[in-house]
Amino acid sequence: MKAIFFLLPLSVIAQEILPDVVVTANRNTEEAKEVPYTLEILTAEDLLENATRTLPQAFLNTPSVLVQQTTTGHGSPYIRGFTGRQNLLLQDGVRLNNSTWRNGPVQYWNTLDAQAIDRLELIKSQGSVLFGSDAIGGTVNTFSKSSNFRQENGPFSGGAAYYRFDTNSESHLGRIEQRFGVGEKWGIMLGYSASDIGDIRDSGLGTMRGTGYSQLSHDLKFEYAFTPSHTLTLAHSHLDQDDISRWHNTIHNRGWTQGSSFTTAGTDLARDYDQERSLTYLRFEDTNISSSWADRYQATISFQRTQDSEFRVRESGRSDTRILDIDTFGLSLEAGTGNTVWGADYFLDQIDSQGFRNSVPRPSNRPIADDSTYESIAIFANYTNTIGQRFTYDTGARFTHIQAQWDGYRPDGATIDQIGDGSWDNLSLSVDNMNLMISGLFSVELPKHSAHPT
């Protein structure tokens, strides 16, 4: 695939990133060479130079990572063999995973605008103490672009415009961003992205009709400095994707044979997905406090809304529609002193689920149980210690309690909805050695409360 780029700077944006400093590995700012995990760092410049269109594509050249793409608008990374809910995706440290993510490949990694990323950190096989059991394969923390007002003096403004054209699929991708504020006092970053992804053209198959889709996104970040170390951040981002086709299932896939390999033709008249996700968070943080219990802290309140729908028309003409709406409320607090970090987080998923057949409500077609809630609360602590010059280790613990409740579950053959609830507790402990390559990790599931339909 060839690409043509146009980058139109409105003014110079000073974004100096220290590539050897990370904050995700131990929830603390530290040099990459001191981190006891395998990590990768990608900056906005890396994504631009590699013509990265989506977040999953950012990992195509990353060791130990395989990207599975069922469609051009989806993508799920396999990090050291794990995918789906076993990899954790963060945006500015806010968890994007929710209770509906399945064990297999998921399409939700593409609901984060790659053009709005300033840098990302990938920590491989970190374990579950700091971030939970969905970080067992890897943790990816994406950092959205900001005004970088602390690097400015006095009033400032600037921005950039970006346009890209892919000649193979005749796709158009563009972004406009603007920043302004007063140096060391406050700053605002505004961004708007739009993409019209065209159909793939293949020498053997011709134009693969239905492989294109459209995408719109916008983002806002406001930062205000109470003191040189105390910052308030208010951020909002929204992305909307339409008409993402599961192309290989449709009649546009005529099937093909190459040597001993072959694929069968699709039979669905249509199978399209729409995806929409928004995130809003408010954060208070102080990196230099005088307290006997901590020298830094960060508190975040977040709200996310995810809307996911599938429309399918089979060969017989029967249509099936599945709609999933998820509202996620989050609270998190972390603090630390020296090489010790501790904290707690709470997340609540409120789920609405609908299913239709030939436009008539069909409860058994719901993607998951309707009118469901999923609550998780966790506390954690981690300590990093160095003995001499050759022995460094991390040790930590995490306790998690989960409560689930569902009201609208209708299995095939049932005439009424079934309801139920359940709760689970888990204790995870870990010891990881960086220099001597000795590591251990174990997790204990405490007695499980009964999950019973009533």
Image (spheres, rainbow, N blue to C red):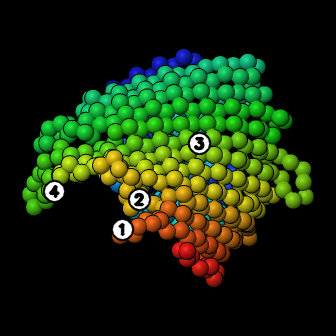
Task: Say whether residue 46 is visible.
Answer: no
Give the labeled residue for mark 4. Answer: 263
| Element under disc 1 | loop
Q: Nearer the viewer, mark 4 or mark 2?
A: 2
In three-dimensional space, the C-alpha distance between marks 3 and 4, rounded to whole angstroms, equals: 39 Å
User: Residue visible at 25% across and 35% down?
Assistant: 199
| Element under disc 2 | helix
Image x and y of residue 110, in percent = 44, 45
The amino acid at mark 1 is Asp
Image x and y of residue 103, in percent = 44, 65
* Tag of residue 279: 3
Residues under numbered marks 3 and 1 in contact, where contact means CB atoms less than 8 Å apart: no
Label 1: how many residues lie within 10 Å, few (<14), some (14-19) or many (20+)?
Answer: few
The amino acid at mark 2 is Pro
Residue sitting farthest toward the front: 415
User: Residue visible at 25% across and 45% down?
Assistant: 270
Q: Earlier in the sequence, mark 3 or mark 1?
A: 3
Q: Earlier in the sequence, mark 2 or mark 1?
A: 2
Residue sitting farthest toward the bottom: 447
Q: Nearer the viewer, mark 4 or mark 1?
A: 1
Give the labeled residue for mark 2. Answer: 363
Task: Say whether residue 375 is visible.
Answer: yes
Q: Which quarter of the figure is the N terminus placed in?
A: top left
